Image: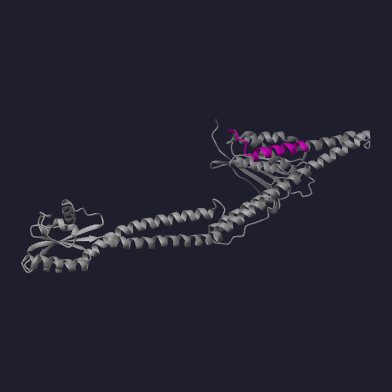
Amino acid sequence: MVKNSLFSKMVVTYTIIITVSFTILAAFLSFWFQDYFIKSRKESLTNQIDVIENVVITYLEGGMTHDELGERIKFIASYIGDDILVLDSEGYVNSTTSMKYNQLIGKQIYHGKLEDLKDDVCVEAINDYGVYLDKKVYVMGEPLKDMYGNVKGAALISISTDNLDSSLSNVYQIIWLSAVLAVIASCVVIYYFSQKMIVNPLSEMSSVARKIASGDVEKRVEIHSDDEMEEFANAFNVMADSLQQVEQNRKEFISNVSHELRSPMTSIKGFIGGILDEVIPPEKHKYYLNIAYEEIQRLARLINDLLDLSAVESGTYKLERTSVDINEIIRLCILRNEGRIKSRNLNVEVYFEGSELIVSCDEDKIIQVVTNLLDNAIKYGNEGGAIKISSEGKGKKACISIFNEGLPIDETDIKHIWDRFYKVDKSRTQKVSTGLGLSIVKKIISLHDEEIWVKNIDNGVKFTFTLPITKKI
């Protein structure tokens, strides 16, 4: 067994619980048995009191001698197994069945009324005359009455608890033997069920976790127990699915980055190599240098987008929220892209609910969001088509929409449109796009704890995102 294993901890805990429980039970039973023994003993002696009463009354009335009284009560004492002391009506000891009480004969050990005789008073009376009773002796006192109800004397019966101790010793042996057997049986049961329901499933999950850590991300745990362990296994599998997806994304990311970097680098290397080797004639140098320059710009855009995405995904970027006019941001982004808009003959329509709409956001990041969405609309909109941009307040939220006329996005593509390097154009012929713009937009909006979505409407595509409305500072 592994040191400090779950099984050993369960056994130790269960053993402690059983031991404490049986200890408490033994203590309770000892007090209960002692009290029960005394009560049952007193009840059993009640019938013998009548016999003692007849003998003592006969003696006190002169019907027998003192020696006969001694013989009679000794016979009764041997029958009941306890010592007897006989008191007259004044509380003097007349006779006893045990030598340890002989020194009390002729002495008045009780000075009160015999009808008020109590058990604890009897013990104190005997101890006062030098006969010290230990805790294992219990004295029962009963007044003796004649046929007219007059108290003629009393009988003290010294009850020993030695028999009780012997009985309790047997009970303790049974209790502790039962406890040992219960612990052994519990260990067997715990071993079986813990192995089946806890240890084995955990060992399986541990083994699968090691395999996943070593790169085998397709491994899963198969547990069908219809309890919390199955829920734990399902959660483990969900985590494994997530890790597999992360690994798949990592591989795709490396593949995409490699492709995006290799294509322009190959073009640049080929054009410059052709110029240096004089394969390309001098009159074509400027043409191919312009192409190389465009490829370098493409590389710069890709690297900048990767840096932006890395900063947002790392969780280290802190938003610098301020109160800004989203309408002014939209105007600024349109002006910056005026040349591209004119080159494609696009008709831009802007709809503002009011002259200004103040929102709380990181201004630089939201400018990047609007720029990327507008850039997307310009690139994929129909030549000579319309681009419609609107902002309006809905409750505590500002809704900003950018619509472009063009081909709708396939429903299967909409699910992945926010993924890194995902392009609807599978042939990758669209060199002006890095495939990171929408992914960056999604991350920035998520950092603001807001939402963004896309819909195909009216022969075009509409992107909408929200920002919280605030007061102008």
Q: Residue 381: percent from the left, percent from the top? A: 73, 45
Q: Residue 397: percent from the left, percent from the top? A: 56, 41
Residue 266's place in the image compared with 159, above or below, is above
Q: Nearer the viewer, residue 237 or 416?
A: 237
Q: Residue 103: percent from the left, percent from the top? A: 15, 56
Q: Residue 188: percent from the left, percent from the top? A: 51, 62
Name the side, left or right, on which 196 lies relative to 128: right
Look at the image and tell me in which quarter the C terminus lies. Answer: top right
Query: Which stretch appears magenta?
Result: 299-323
Q: Nearer the viewer, residue 163 or 462?
A: 163
Q: Nearer the viewer, residue 193 or 248?
A: 193
Look at the image and tell me in which quarter the N terminus lies. Answer: bottom right
Residue 379's place in the image compared with 126, above or below, is above
Q: Quadrant of residue 48?
A: bottom left
Tell me if I can see residue 341 in this picture. no
Residue 72's place in the image compared with 279, above or below, is below
Tell me if I can see residue 197 in this picture. yes
